[in-house]
Image (spheres, rainbow, N blue to C red):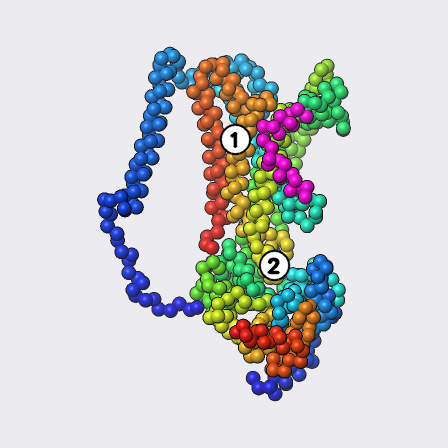
């Protein structure tokens, strides 16, 4: 229908309703309840605060974070950074934070990949695949995570000892001490190559974005792979070679009662990661399935009928609509993985909760310990939801 | 258009190579036989209307023409290219065949203009400025250029369907398929969409329309095909088919359609 002339009466401003000081006015009722709620919250906080301060005074407990600089004397089995028990509590807590991040970040990535595959498999035309993935989702979602963690840990503890370790390939050992893998002596050249690779990822991403923008303006399709090859393979290799191409294999070997050398995946880390990933993947699968099913089949057909290839149909039509449905609940799952990683305590993986717990036991600084744990989870969670909200806003539908 | 002119026009078209050839096409959904030995040629520039009761296979038939459905027996050739599992043949055919759906199927995350430029940019590799100019040209032809910056959800059903027509035309197809384009619309919107389709027919576009709009069929169709239970029962010029139905099935169908309107 074409735009006809507008009736001038419809241009009048809406009538203003005067505020009446009466219970019948919903605005007055609204203000009343807001005052009540804020009053209750403020009183609770004040009560908790004064109670705490009073009790601390009575028990003569010193507050403050001075204890962080004292020697920890606390052994930690696995750490990304150098650590020994003579280091400070601060460093011990940083090790715990890094261990939490190690399991959360890897867990988020693996759960996303694994969950997406299962979600797609649930929509498969293949009966076996569909039934298997549906069973997986139902079973995994119905069992408590703690039980699953204990299950994986028990299985790993049931593995043979180091002397009878499974030895499927040269330098690979699987025992109750964890999985040992061949690695290399890490040197500056490797760090540089890794850095070059990360820079290469950014460069490739930016190039790809620009190539797409250029294709839209001038119509000429451009390949990304030559740039990716140079940025991701050639430059890192050159950086490594420029520093003498160091390569000293570090192969684990049995010395006495345990292994030495190589890369170790501890049974605790492995059990925690496996449990978190498998549990969360069940939820991610359902989210992905819902997202895909939320896009009507007609959208795919219309895109195909216009001559778009399957990849373009997915990228330009299906994904932009499916992600809208997927991203908000996915954010919750990422937060869940991070917070559920605190169940590490149950199987002896030393994450931030485990180390902060030991710290508060040793120093008696319970409030500070709990505050640190809260601060860590709050920071990680706000960072995740901040990033996901930004991403969601970017892909959101403007109008529907 | 007078009858004699129609005769001349269709005689001229008969010499041209057929745009669409269906030869003994059979299709089953599971055990259900939905297309039975359908043989049909559509000449270049011909306007064909396909009608029939629901479940007669008419939608399946036109969805087979651009392979949104696959047939299991027989051959379909579009613009001389045979439909098969060959993806390059499929690409070539889908570029030449535009389709308009009953439920519009506009992309809700793109503006009207972006809906129209998506395929020209990504399939035809047309520069954006050129694609936009082309899109505006077609949006003007379907009489909604002022809606270009809006999203599909902000438009009425009739406007959305006209955008869907413009979107298909932006690929400059040789053949247009319409799958019950007015069945989801209110009467006043049916009119605006049909007017757009009549305008398109006047440009000489090859059109295959599944529709129950008898007025439209009479006005523009060169030939009407009546389908029932997966087979073509009767076909001929609209006046002949509608005035002198030979089979009981078509008589029954026509009486039901007329009662409905």
Residue occupying image coordinates x 71% and y 64%: B33
Q: What element carries label 2?
A: helix
* Frontmost residue, B44 versus A69: B44
Residue occupying image coordinates x 71% and y 58%: B30
Residue occupying image coordinates x 49% and y 14%: A362
Quadrant of residue B124 within the rendered picture = bottom right
**In this view, A183 is above or below A125:** above
Quadrant of residue A95 within the rendered picture = top right
Tell me the CA gap for discs 2 and 1.
41 Å
Q: Main secondary structure of the magenta part?
A: helix
Return the residue at label 1. A339
Image side of residue B219 versus residue B39, left or right:
left
Image side of residue A23 versus residue B176, left or right:
left
Magenta span covers which residues? A131-155
Q: What element carries label 1?
A: helix
Q: Do the residues labelled 2 and 1 touch (CB within 8 Å)?
A: no
Give x and y (percent) for residue A61.
39, 13
Residue occupying image coordinates x 66% and y 70%: B228
Which of the chains bears the disc numbered 1? Answer: A
Q: How many marks?
A: 2
Return the residue at label 2. A301
* Label 1 crowd bin: few (<14), some (14–19), many (20+), radius 10 Å: some
**In this view, B86 is above or below A389:** below
């Amino acid at each position: 229908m074409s735009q006809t002339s507008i009736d001038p009466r419809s241009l009048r401003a809406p009538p203003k309703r005067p505020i009446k000081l009466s219970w019948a006015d919903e605005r007055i009722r609204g203000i009343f309840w807001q005052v009540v709620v804020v009053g209750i919250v403020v009183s609770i906080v004040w009560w908790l605060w004064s109670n705490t301060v009073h009790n601390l005074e009575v028990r003569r407990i010193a507050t403050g974070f001075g204890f962080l600089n004292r020697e920890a004397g606390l052994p930690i089995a696995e750490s990304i950074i150098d650590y020994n028990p003579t280091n400070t509590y601060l460093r011990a807590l940083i090790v715990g934070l890094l261990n939490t991040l190690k399991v959360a970040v890897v867990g988020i990535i693996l759960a996303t990949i694994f969950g997406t595959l299962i979600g797609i498999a649930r929509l498969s035309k293949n009966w076996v695949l569909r039934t298997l993935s549906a069973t997986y989702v139902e079973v995994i979602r119905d069992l408590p995570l703690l039980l699953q963690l204990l299950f994986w840990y028990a299985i790993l503890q049931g593995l043979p000892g180091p002397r009878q370790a499974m030895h499927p390939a040269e330098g690979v050992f699987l025992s109750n001490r964890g999985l040992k893998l061949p690695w290399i002596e890490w040197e500056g050249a490797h760090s540089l190559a890794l850095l070059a690779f990360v820079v290469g990822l950014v460069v490739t991403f930016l190039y790809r974005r620009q190539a797409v923008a250029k294709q839209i303006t001038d119509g000429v399709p451009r390949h990304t792979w030559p740039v990716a090859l140079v940025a991701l393979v050639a430059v890192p290799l050159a950086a490594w070679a420029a520093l003498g191409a160091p390569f000293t294999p570090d192969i684990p070997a049995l010395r006495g009662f345990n292994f030495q050398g190589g890369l170790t995946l501890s049974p605790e880390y492995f059990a925690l990661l496996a449990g978190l990933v498998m549990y969360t993947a069940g939820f991610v699968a359902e989210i992905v399935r819902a997202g895909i099913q939320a896009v009507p089949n007609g959208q795919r057909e219309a895109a195909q009928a216009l001559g778009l290839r399957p990849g373009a149909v997915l990228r330009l039509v299906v994904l932009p609509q499916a992600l809208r449905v997927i991203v908000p609940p996915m954010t919750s799952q990422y937060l869940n993985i991070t917070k559920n990683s605190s169940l590490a305590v149950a199987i002896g993986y030393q994450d931030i909760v485990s180390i902060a717990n030991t710290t508060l036991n040793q120093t008696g600084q319970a409030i500070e310990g709990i505050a640190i744990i809260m601060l860590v989870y709050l920071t990680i969670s706000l960072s995740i939801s901040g990033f996901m909200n930004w991403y969601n806003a970017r892909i959101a539908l403007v109008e529907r | 258009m007078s009858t004699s002119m129609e005769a001349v026009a269709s005689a001229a078209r008969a010499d041209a190579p057929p745009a669409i050839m269906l030869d003994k096409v059979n299709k089953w959904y599971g055990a259900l036989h939905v297309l039975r030995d359908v043989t049909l040629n559509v000449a270049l520039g011909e306007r064909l209307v396909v009608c029939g009761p629901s479940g007669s296979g008419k939608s399946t038939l036109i969805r087979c023409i651009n392979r949104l459905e696959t047939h299991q027996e027989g051959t379909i050739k579009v613009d001389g290219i045979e439909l098969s599992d060959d993806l390059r043949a499929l690409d070539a055919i889908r570029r030449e065949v535009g389709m308009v759906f009953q439920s519009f199927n506009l992309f809700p995350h793109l503006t009207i203009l972006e809906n129209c430029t998506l395929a020209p940019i990504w399939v035809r590799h047309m520069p954006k400025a050129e694609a936009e100019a082309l899109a505006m040209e077609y949006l003007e032809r379907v009489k909604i250029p002022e809606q270009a910056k809006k999203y599909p959800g902000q438009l009425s059903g009739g406007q959305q369907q006209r955008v869907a027509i413009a979107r298909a035309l932006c690929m400059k197809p040789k053949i247009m398929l319409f799958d019950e384009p007015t069945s989801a619309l209110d009467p006043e919107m049916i009119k605006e969409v049909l007017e757009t389709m009549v305008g398109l027919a006047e440009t000489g576009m090859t059109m295959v329309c599944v529709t129950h709009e008898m007025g439209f069929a009479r006005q523009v169709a060169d030939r009407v095909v009546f389908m029932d239970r997966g087979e073509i029962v009767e076909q001929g010029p609209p006046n002949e088919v509608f005035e002198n139905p030979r089979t009981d099935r078509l008589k029954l169908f026509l009486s039901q359609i007329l009662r409905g309107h």
